[in-house]
Amino acid sequence: MSELNLILLGPPGAGKGTQATLLTEDFGLPHVSTGDMLRAARDAGSELGLAAKEYMDKGELVPDAVVIGLILERLADDDARDGFLLDGFPRTIEQAGALGQQLEGHERRLTAVLLLEAPDELVVQRISGRRICRKEGHVYHVDFDPPKHPGHCDIDGSELEQRDDDREDTVRNRLDVYHAQTEPLIAYYEERGLLRRFDGTRSPRQVHERIRATLATLRLEEDL
Ligand SMILES: [Zn+2]
């Protein structure tokens, strides 16, 4: 069976996390989220992990070379032998170029880049409407999944709050960064014939079915 080496791309709030979970369940691919990976590497204390820790402790961005080194280390693990699902990297054209080169050097290449598209206003509505209960972290949405009593958790009655990351101004800033830095990756991967687009406004289940169908076709083509 051919490998499924995938990148998940799209703005915040387009449903990447949900799709990653579903794809991991279906295809057994490890979800390599660079944020989680960096924290794990820092705590594990490998050579590269310690290098990353130095930058993270100072609140600085971890250099691309260190992140890519960690990704390649992670992809060498047994569970990533048949493929992986990379999320959160690359975010710029430079990173995409460096990652592609390094993968090639390790005799791997990308199978596809899965782009989840969603308009800004929907992203803002989805994220800024989230409310989390203080006690147990139960999640609500003021429009899509409101609690019975506004401001209070249905399960334990504790107060609901909005996380700083979910505030509208924060979301709009993240979208600005996405449009400026990450969106150019769409054309980059399109030129290389790797891009597959999915409508992130649909339900998670519908999006997942489309992705599954696309991956099945890609695998057939690769195995021919
Ligand atoms: Zn609760």
Image (cartoon, grey):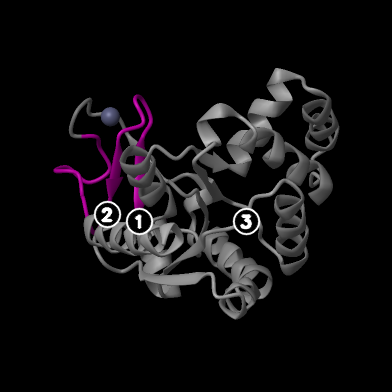
Circle number at residue 142: 2
The chief SS type of the magenta part is loop
Cβ atoms at labels 2 and 1 below 8 Å apart? yes
SS assignment at label 3 = loop
Q: Is residue 65 above or below residue 54?
A: below
Determine if the magenta segment contains residue 129.
yes
Q: Looking at this view, is 115 or 123 the one in front?
A: 115
- Disc 1/disc 3 C-alpha distance (Å): 39 Å
Residue 82 in percent (x, y) is at 49, 40
Name the residue that disc number 1 marks: 129
Residue 219 in percent (x, y) is at 40, 57
For badge 3, the amino acid type reads Arg
Residue 61 in percent (x, y) is at 79, 47
Instruction: Identify the magenta region.
Output: 128-153
SS assignment at label 1 = loop
Q: Residue at x 49, y 59 (%)?
A: 12
Cβ atoms at labels 1 and 3 below 8 Å apart? no
Whether residue 63 can be seen here: no
Q: Looking at this view, is 140 or 187 the one in front?
A: 187
Q: Looking at this view, is 127 or 37 the one in front?
A: 37
- Disc 3/disc 2 C-alpha distance (Å): 42 Å
Q: Is residue 142 above or below residue 66?
A: below
Circle number at residue 109: 3
Asked whether, in this view, residue 75 is left or right of residue 203, the answer is right
Determine if the magenta segment contains residue 213.
no
- Disc 2/disc 1 C-alpha distance (Å): 5 Å
Q: Residue at x 85, y 31 (%)?
A: 51
